[in-house]
Image: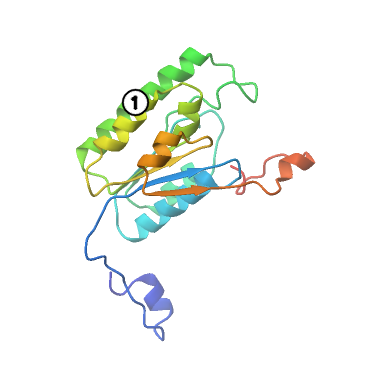
Amino acid sequence: MINSHFERLHPELDVTFLKPEKRVGLVVVLTGYGKGKTSSAVGMVVRACGHGMKVCMIQFMKGDIYTGEWDGIRKMRCDVELIPAGMGFCGILGNPFSHAQHREAAQRALRMAKEKLESGRYDLIVLDEINNALNLKLVDLEQVLDIVRSRTPLTHLVLTGRDAHPDVVEIADTVSEVREVKHAYRKKIEPQPGIDF
């Protein structure tokens, strides 16, 4: 990627573009009770966009409340497909849908994820909040492990959400746990655009 925007802005810097000798698709798990799991995944989407990679992000829980990444990613004009496939957070924030309805939506999202992973057309696939979906029994452990196994060898797969199952952690290449130290919510400060959604 010669003559990148950065190089044009900073011609005085000698920018190195790394290229691994062997390209490998990684499985990354972002979990924990702290804020920033989806934000970290969106950061990877932005990086992949910069490298000209084809990306798909499927959101297993989000879909009933607007979140800025929907339009933010679209405005980047990259090869990124973002699919809010969920019906909101099951059982909280006054969500009106039954567990069965949430499970049906999560099962559709899982089928879509498997199809996209098996296609080999994507460099990076993010399954946002799939760990929550597994913990809430909207998807089954064997289904998630099958998803991880079904990816093509060069496809990166990111799984986000609290309560990552130990078997998912075990199969992953990289696992990061986001720990809450302090959160504005505890001070009764409502979620803020651009920070929380």
Extreme-right residue of the structure = 187
Residue 156 visible in the snapshot: yes
Residue 189 visible in the snapshot: no
Residue 13 in the image, given as x and y percentages of width and height: 41, 83
Quadrant where the image shows the N terminus? bottom left
User: In the image, 38: left or right of 195?
Assistant: left
Q: Amino acid at mark 1?
A: Glu
Residue 93 in the image, given as x and y percentages of width and height: 65, 25
Residue found 39% across the figure and 26% down from its top: 141
In terms of depth relative to the viewer, which is nearer, 28 or 15? 28
Quadrant where the image shows the C terminus? top right
Look at the picture and state if 176 lies above or below 97.
Answer: below
Indicate the quadrant where residue 65 lies: top right
Identify residue for label 1: 142
User: Is label 1 in a helix, a strand or a loop?
Assistant: helix
Residue found 31% across the figure and 33% down from its top: 147
Residue found 45% across the figure and 27% down from its top: 134
Residue 94 in the image, given as x and y percentages of width and height: 65, 21
Residue 92 in the image, given as x and y percentages of width and height: 62, 24
Look at the picture and state if 186 lies above or below 133.
Answer: below
Indicate the quadrant where residue 188 lies: top right
Look at the picture and state if 2 lies above or below 110.
Answer: below
Residue found 55% across the figure and 23% down from its top: 90
User: In the image, 140: left or right of 185?
Assistant: left
Other residues around mark 1 within 10 Å, as few (<14) / some (14–19) / many (≥20): few
